[in-house]
Image: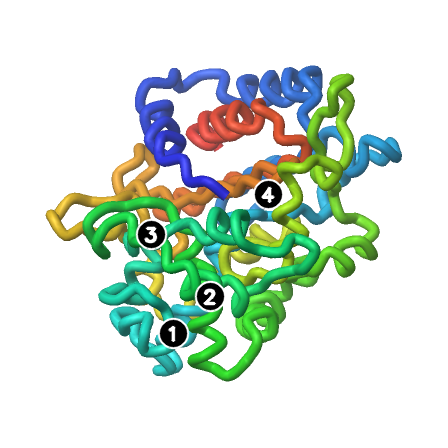
């Protein structure tokens, strides 16, 4: 679930200093090396919506020895925030809310002076809801947004800073966004996501699934971590994964699951006005300016680099037990990289780097 600003800066610097020859061989070599190193996942690179390279490596389930395919479905973790931000932007265009509305207009929270814009851009100063729940919640029960909001009110951990003063990645902010969308529309956030995004874009493999729903999806890629013997096993067997169960009903910061094909549909839809206007998209892809005027590198659900060597780059990473996910979009040249990993492997970023270099030639 964490944001890693150095990744977006590193990709930009890589393109500036890398040689312009043998990019294709760099990617082929990286794929072979990743496979040798035990990487498990799917990588897709595209230009103008056309797939240039799509490959599955590793296992859907190591314990059952089932190989991955390119159509397999992965937990997206924080890539889900792109969809949460889009739901809010659609609410805005339907005139159900304003981006600069105060949060207390919609929710009873003990934190004043925070706007929806602050939530979208991770500049709210809100404390970490997971830390609050970890200390106080009865983990034999499953919590969702109402319970999270109740515990934030009950224990009222102080703000980390005043709204707009700094950027600090906040899953709490995106929980609140999910609840604001429900309050503004009178509909469940899962229903909104399906009706406003997944179904119109024909993202047939994409949904916000419960643990029970994921269990019956035949091509759901299991998240894996290494046990004490160095074997990959289901990440749900580890204590550090428990929060995915006892916070299993949260909506907004995560829980979308999808595959690379559907994410390419999503990527391409963002070049059109199928969901929202170009003006709203431009705002989403613009970095927030802090109170002191400095730029933050985050818009509405997207990390932003306005001046990469390919022009404006927007991206996001996801990080859940057993999963690493990333989408990189060079939006001025319509070039896309998607990597979904289900064994929390360090070679994921090497594949992104190699694919980024290859896009210089493609």
Residue receiving disc 1:
108
Name the front one of labels 4 and 2. 2
Sequence-earlier tag: 2 or 1: 1
Do the residues bearing badges 4 and 2 touch, measured as CB atoms within 8 Å? no
Give the SS element for disc 4. Answer: strand
Crowding at dot 1, Cα within 10 Å, few <14 / some 14-19 / many 20+, comes out as few
Q: Residue at x 88, y 35 (%)?
A: 64
Q: Position of residue 193 (x, y in %)?
A: 56, 69
- At 54% from the left and 80% from the top, the residue drawn is 187
Q: Earlier in the sequence, mark 1 or mark 3?
A: 1
Q: Are marks 3 and 2 in contact (CB under 8 Å)?
A: no
Tag in front: 1 or 3: 1
Q: Seen in the image, is 324 located left or right of residue 287?
A: right
Q: Position of residue 41 (x, y in %)?
A: 67, 34
Contact? badges 1 and 3 (CB < 8 Å) = no
Q: Are marks 2 and 1 in contact (CB under 8 Å)?
A: yes
Residue 77: x and y, percent? 56, 47
In front of the other: 340 or 20: 340
Q: Nearer the viewer's eye, disc 3 or disc 2?
A: 2
- Residue to which mark 3 is pinned: 122
Q: Residue at x 83, y 51 (%)?
A: 218
- Residue beneath the point at 75% across and 55% down: 214
Disc 4 from disc 3: Cα separation = 33 Å
Q: Quick check: 49 left or right of 152?
A: right
The residues tagged by marks 1 and 3 sit, at their Cα atoms, a distance apart of: 19 Å
Which label was assigned to residue 360?
none
Which residue does the numbered mark 2 point to in the structure image?
A: 149
Question: Under tag 3, what secondary structure?
Answer: loop
Q: Earlier in the sequence, mark 4 or mark 3?
A: 4
Q: CA distance from mark 4 to mark 2?
A: 42 Å
């Amino acid at each position: 679930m964490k944001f890693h600003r150095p990744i977006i800066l590193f990709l930009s610097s890589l393109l500036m200093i890398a040689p312009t020859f043998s990019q294709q061989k760099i990617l082929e070599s990286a794929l072979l090396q990743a496979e040798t190193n035990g990487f498990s996942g799917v990588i897709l690179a595209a230009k103008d919506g056309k797939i240039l390279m799509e490959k599955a490596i590793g296992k859907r389930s190591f314990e059952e020895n089932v190989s991955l395919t390119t159509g397999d479905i992965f937990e997206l973790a924080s890539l889900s925030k792109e969809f949460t931000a889009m739901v809010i932007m659609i609410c805005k265009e339907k005139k159900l809310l304003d981006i600069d509305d105060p949060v207390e207009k919609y929710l009873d929270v003990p934190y004043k002076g925070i706007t929806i814009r602050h939530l979208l851009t991770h500049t709210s100063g809100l404390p970490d809801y997971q830390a609050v729940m970890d200390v106080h919640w009865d983990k034999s029960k499953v919590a969702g947004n109402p319970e999270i909001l109740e515990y934030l009110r009950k224990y009222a951990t102080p703000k980390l800073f005043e709204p707009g003063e700094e950027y600090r990645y906040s899953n709490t902010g995106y929980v609140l966004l999910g609840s604001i969308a429900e309050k503004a529309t009178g509909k469940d956030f899962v229903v909104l996501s399906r009706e406003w995004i997944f179904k119109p874009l024909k993202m047939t493999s994409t949904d916000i699934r419960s643990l029970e729903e994921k269990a019956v999806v035949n091509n759901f890629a299991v998240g894996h971590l290494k046990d004490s013997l160095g074997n990959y096993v289901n990440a749900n067997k580890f204590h550090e994964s428990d929060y995915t169960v006892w916070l299993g009903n949260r909506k907004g910061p995560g829980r979308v699951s999808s595959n690379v094909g559907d994410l390419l549909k999503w990527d391409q839809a963002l070049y059109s006005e199928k969901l929202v206007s170009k003006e709203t998209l431009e705002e989403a892809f613009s970095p927030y300016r802090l109170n002191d005027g400095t730029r933050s590198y985050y818009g509405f659900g997207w990390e932003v680099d306005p001046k990469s060597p390919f022009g404006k780059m927007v991206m996001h990473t996801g990080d859940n037990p057993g999963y690493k996910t990333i989408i990189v979009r060079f939006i001025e040249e319509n070039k896309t990289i998607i990597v979904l990993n289900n064994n929390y492997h360090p070679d994921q970023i090497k594949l992104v780097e190699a694919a980024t270099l290859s896009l210089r030639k493609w």
